[in-house]
Amino acid sequence: MDSSPNDCNTIASFYGVSGRNLQTQYKDFLSDFKAWDQKAHAKKWLLFPKNIGKRLSIDETSLSNGELYTIVTNKSGKGRKGTIVDMVAGTKAENVISIIEKIPLKERNLVKEITLDMAGNMGLIARKCFANATRVTDRFHVQKLATEALQEIRIKYRWEAIDLENDAIEKAKKSKVNFESKTLSNGDTLKQLLARSRYFLYKTKTKWTPNQAERAVLLFELYPDIQKGYNLTQELRGIFENTKDKIIGFAKLAKWHEKVNQSGFKSFGTISRTIMNHYQTILNYFD
């Protein structure tokens, strides 16, 4: 028997009926939606107190039309039914706190750990609602900053390459000669190399395809700064992936900070300062 889920349109096609009509019938008559006890406020907030656990996460996400929601989840749920503890429209701390505080204080005090990003509103929510919980900065938010800094370096060189090509085209027009872009050994122009390198810079070297590895060799030869930024990004990733002790994590991050200072990259320097300002919650990740 097939146990995988199907949407209403797929099911409707089996019986030759309208998918939209089947969806409406399910919502209005079969799903008990009209009798749902959270229907009145569902657009603003949802709360599932029974789903609370000892290890939680709080984050913001965009579900539709770019609108942000603040969501608290139970890590033990692993994305399945029973994972969501609460969902609140918007990111204002006071609104989220007022909903979470509907859960009895006794139950909230049993939470041992809460993972969050480095935004001030998230820290305030965690402190107010889960006073006994250890706050842990989500490593993926830290790594995302490093990746964005790396891409910033790539984008800077890409704009420079576009300007150089535009200058060459204009010069060729004035000289009344045909312009032909110079291509590299893999067939890319400089502009194409910098644009197409975006994807593999997100990945570790072990996950590069042969074409990506070839492109990386060319990119790093022509733009050593991008290679330095890539190495800093991958080293930071490695610290989080391979360190299980807080003291060792502290030492490795200190060495990483020193390399950032030596690099002279402004954006990486900003990340370094951000990490220092959230050192305690970041180091809690290694416990």
Image: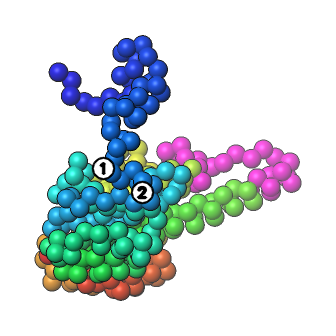
Q: Nearer the viewer, residue 58 or 216?
A: 58
User: Which residue matches tag 1?
Assistant: 207
Disc tally is 2
Magenta residues, start to end: 168-191
Quick check: is 177 in the magenta stretch? Answer: yes
Residue 238 visible here:
no
Q: Residue at x 36, y 73 (%)?
A: 98
Identify the disc placed on residue 41.
2
Quick check: is 241 in the magenta stretch? Answer: no
Identify the disc placed on residue 218.
none
Residue 261 position by quadrant = bottom left
The answer to whether mark 2 and mark 1 are in CB contact below 8 A is no
Looking at the rendered image, the quarter that the N terminus falls into is top left
Does residue 197 lie above or below 263 as drawn? Answer: above
Mark 1: secondary structure: helix
User: Which amino acid is tagged 1?
Assistant: Lys
Mark 2: secondary structure: helix
Q: Nearer the viewer, residue 37 or 24?
A: 37
Residue 166 position by quadrant = bottom right
Residue 173 visible here:
yes
- Image location (x, y in percent) of residue 193: 53, 52
- Image location (x, y in percent) of residue 152: 51, 67
Q: Decide if residue 224 is on the left or right side of residue 48.
A: right
Residue 283 position by quadrant = bottom left
Looking at the rendered image, the quarter that the C terminus falls into is bottom left
Mark 1 closeness class: few <14, some 14–19, many ≥20 residues within 10 Å: few
Judged from this view, the residue extending furthest toward the top is 16
- Image location (x, y in percent) of residue 218: 46, 55
Name the front one of labels 2 and 1.
2
Predominant secondary structure in magenta? loop
User: Which amino acid is tagged 2?
Assistant: His
